[in-house]
Image: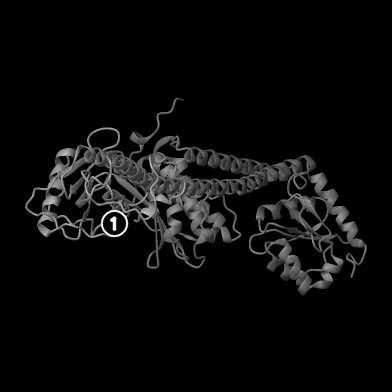
Amino acid sequence: MPNQSILVVDDSTDMLALQKSILEADGFDVFTSRSGTEALEALSKIEEPSLIILDNQMEDMSGTDFLSLLEEQKPEIVTVVPIVFLSAAEMPSIGKAVGFIRKFPDFPDIDVFLSAIHQFIAAGRKRPLHQQ
Amino acid sequence: MSDSEIDSEEGNSFSPKRQRTKGEKISSGTESDPILSWQEQSYDRLKTLYDVSKLLSRVVDIEEIFPKVLALESAVFPISTATLIECRGKSAKTTFWHSEDATEEQIQRALANARQSFGYLTGSPPPTSDMKLDAIFSGNPDGSRNTQPGNLDKPKDYLVLPLLVDRLPAFGVLQLEGSGSTSEQDLEFVDALAHLMAVAVDRYYKTLDERELRKKEAKESAEKLSDSQQEVAELVDDRLLRESFVSLLTHDLRTPLSAAKISAQLIQRQADNPETFRSLAARIVDNISRTDRMVRDLLDANRIGSGEKLPLHIERFDLHSLVTETLEELGTVHGDRFQFVSDTHVQGFWDRESLRRVVENLCHNAVKYGSPDSPIQISLARKDVEVQLMVQNQGELISTEDQKTLFRQFRRTEKAQGSRRKGWGLGLTLVRGVAEAHGGNVKVESDSETGTVFTVTLPLDARPFVQIQES
């Protein structure tokens, strides 16, 4: 069975490297993008990922803004690919995303992080993800 | 003022010794007039004083009241001139009245006498004769005409009375020039009148003073209020800044800690993959160092904020080498943005780590806020017993308004705040704190010709400026 892939969007190279390490160690193929713009490009080139992780505190284009853009330009992705925010807020509003993972203390705990990832991917198997 | 008016005043609690019937004329004759008995005259005088006191019970301008008082007065004691000179206020005021047939000579003589008397009685220099009269009235106060022409050759009696309230010196004089001869009773009457006038004048000025005082106090209160409001606004402003700073801070501190934690966990989970250990461990060390630097910056900023000088660890080194090293490291993070345009090697005594931070902060800011298309130029220049480090970038300029608050804690220019770029607003605070701890300074210039230049000036030897530290 081919590996499941995850697209990680974050403007911090450190964060990208960390997530890549964790997810690859867990058996995922990981694609990284440093901005919303890069992510759009990447999505045109790669196969549909099983999950998209969006940093919600990016400088040039926030995760929320990217999600809106994605809905506009690639609505089919938003319908079938589960998208989660990685957020510094306690209770961010998620819009069309399926959920969020807190940067503190959830993300630094690898077990908690991976467990959430798996849950969100499973949710993605129910299609469509959102009520039309 | 007619008799009927006087008698029909309301609230007249004065019980007359005899009823006056309407139509009975008050003679304008003197006290020796056999028409009125002594008792009747006394009654008239007391009644007049009563009326005058009622008149003066309102606080009015002297000019307004003087003719009215004289009108009442003349019913009892006819006069040809009346002079009131007082200096209760800021300057001496002269109010003068003369009858219609008073001559110019008479007027001048009365004025002169009054002025002289004023000088004696008050101890103030008498108002000079060419001083403008503040008010001058003429005509018979009661509207009647003098029945006999003034006898010009006969010396007139001046009744001159001081105006005073509680203690000497007097603050003015009231001079009445009788048109006939005066008796002792007249004198008593005029004396009583003078007392009433004195009280009225004093009270008038007191009221003015009080009003001015109240105005002044109101103004001061308003100023104080607006100062307090401004203080509150600034405190709220500071608090908001600090709050957003704290949330930024906790995020920024926790990020490298998260990274360290994750790296440690990966080591645990990949015990069978020891090749990864080296890089993971390096990452841990790196992130902890980063956290430590942030904490140190915060501590230093706090010290600076409370007015303390930063403690420095002085070493002798070559500033040129330090700058070169630092720019190399910055280059790995930001790319090839920096040009070191100087070959001046300068040895001196400074705090190595602090100056590294200064270079890092200034360069970091230049990258953050300057134009990404042009290089950032760093230079060193030796000036006498000082050295200057300059960091220059092109791009949007810093307004003169912003320049004023640039180095303050937590301050970020509006442009900086507007951009989503994160920042603590401490960088420049630290730069200035370090410069000043070395006995130097930092300044900024920003104009369209040169762009933005930060210049840090340091003494070659900072040792004399440094805090003695208990080790």
Choose between B78 and B316: the one closer to the eye.
Answer: B78
In the depicted structure, whether residue B173 falls above or below residue B330: above
Residue B456 lies, in percent from the top left, at 38, 50
Colouring mode (rainbow / by chain / secondary structure / one colour): one colour
In the depicted structure, whether residue A80 falls above or below residue B1: below
From this viewpoint, is residue B459 visible?
no
From this viewpoint, is residue B359 visible?
yes
Most distant residue in the right direction: A126
Q: Which residue is mark 1?
A: B142
Amino acid identity at mark 1: Asp
Quadrant that contains the N terminus of chain B: bottom left
Residue A126 lies, in percent from the top left, at 93, 62
Task: Locate residue B118 relative to residue A38 in the image: left or right.
Answer: left
In the depicted structure, whether residue B151 falls above or below residue B458: below
Count how many numbered circles sit on residues in the image: 1
Most distant residue in the left direction: B153
- The image quarter containing residue B164 is top left
Q: Residue at x 56, y 58 (%)?
A: B417
Residue B206 lies, in percent from the top left, at 35, 43
Q: Residue at x 12, y 59 (%)?
A: B104
Residue B283 lies, in percent from the top left, at 66, 45
Question: In the rendered structure, the residue with mark 1 lies on which chain?
Answer: B
Most distant residue in the front direction: B34
Task: Locate residue B6 relative to residue B385 in the image: left or right.
Answer: right
